Image: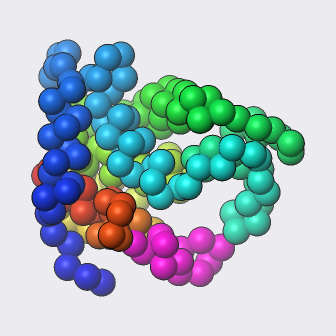
């Protein structure tokens, strides 16, 4: 595993979201949306999931499932077509209404934990499900305030269909030339 470390590009991404945010009760928001949802969606989920405007059958998933937009599987039917704006809305709505509240329920004080750590956990949840993320070592370590160790622990989720996938390794760790990795973002803000 490459050394996980903070980077200027990840720090800049965090700073841009913080600059666009307002604090309400100690929680950062961009408009009505939690800043962690915006950061995770913009810097982690969209770049790594790849946007597909036409529904496709994801055969790597177990079980296989119809998918659209940025890896969204909710209420997707064969033949569905979405617009870029519709994909943005789907992602923000699910992240804000399902994934963020799900993590709040399983991790005490989630909304007041470091922004970069919240974003990493949201991206992880989008990819593996809230249940798996909540039961993870990454969640347990974050709950205990061991954020750097939690960032590293989340890199273990690098398999799909039982096989290690190089794209997931890059997503979970230090990213690639054009995309920030989850651990990279996470350690850049904790």
Q: Who is closer to the viewer here, 1 or 30?
A: 30
Q: Is residue 83 visible?
A: yes
Is residue 134 in the magenta section?
no
The residue located at (39%, 42%) in the rendering is 42
Q: Is residue 141 visible?
A: no
Compared to residue 161, the image places residue 145 above or below, namely: above
Compared to residue 14, the image places residue 85 above or below, namely: above
Q: Residue furthest right?
A: 79
- Magenta-colored span: 158-170
The residue located at (19%, 37%) in the rendering is 16
Q: Quadrant of the N terminus?
A: bottom left
Q: Quadrant of residue 110?
A: top left
- Classify residue 107 as left or right of residue 19: right
Q: How many marks?
A: 0
On the image, the x and y values in percent for residue 50 come to 56, 55
Q: Residue furthest bottom?
A: 1
On the image, the x and y values in percent for residue 86 come to 62, 29
On the image, the x and y values in percent for residue 57 come to 79, 57
């Amino acid at each position: 595993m490459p050394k996980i470390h903070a980077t200027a590009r990840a720090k800049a991404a965090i700073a841009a979201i913080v600059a666009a945010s307002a604090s309400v009760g100690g929680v950062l928001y961009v408009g009505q949306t939690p800043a962690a949802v915006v950061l995770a969606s913009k810097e982690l989920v969209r770049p790594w999931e790849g946007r597909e405007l036409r529904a496709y059958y994801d055969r790597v998933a177990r079980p296989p499932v119809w998918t659209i937009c940025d890896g969204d599987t909710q209420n997707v039917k064969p033949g569905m077509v979405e617009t870029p704006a519709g994909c943005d809305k789907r992602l923000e709505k699910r992240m804000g209404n399902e994934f963020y509240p799900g993590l709040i329920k399983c991790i005490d004080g989630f909304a007041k934990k470091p922004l970069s750590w919240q974003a990493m956990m949201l991206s992880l949840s989008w990819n593996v499900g809230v249940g798996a993320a909540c039961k993870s070592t990454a969640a347990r370590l974050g709950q205990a305030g061991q954020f750097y160790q939690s960032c590293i622990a989340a890199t273990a989720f690098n398999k799909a269909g039982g096989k290690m996938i190089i794209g997931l390794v890059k997503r979970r760790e230090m990213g690639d030339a054009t995309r920030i990795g989850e651990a990279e973002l996470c350690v850049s803000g904790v």
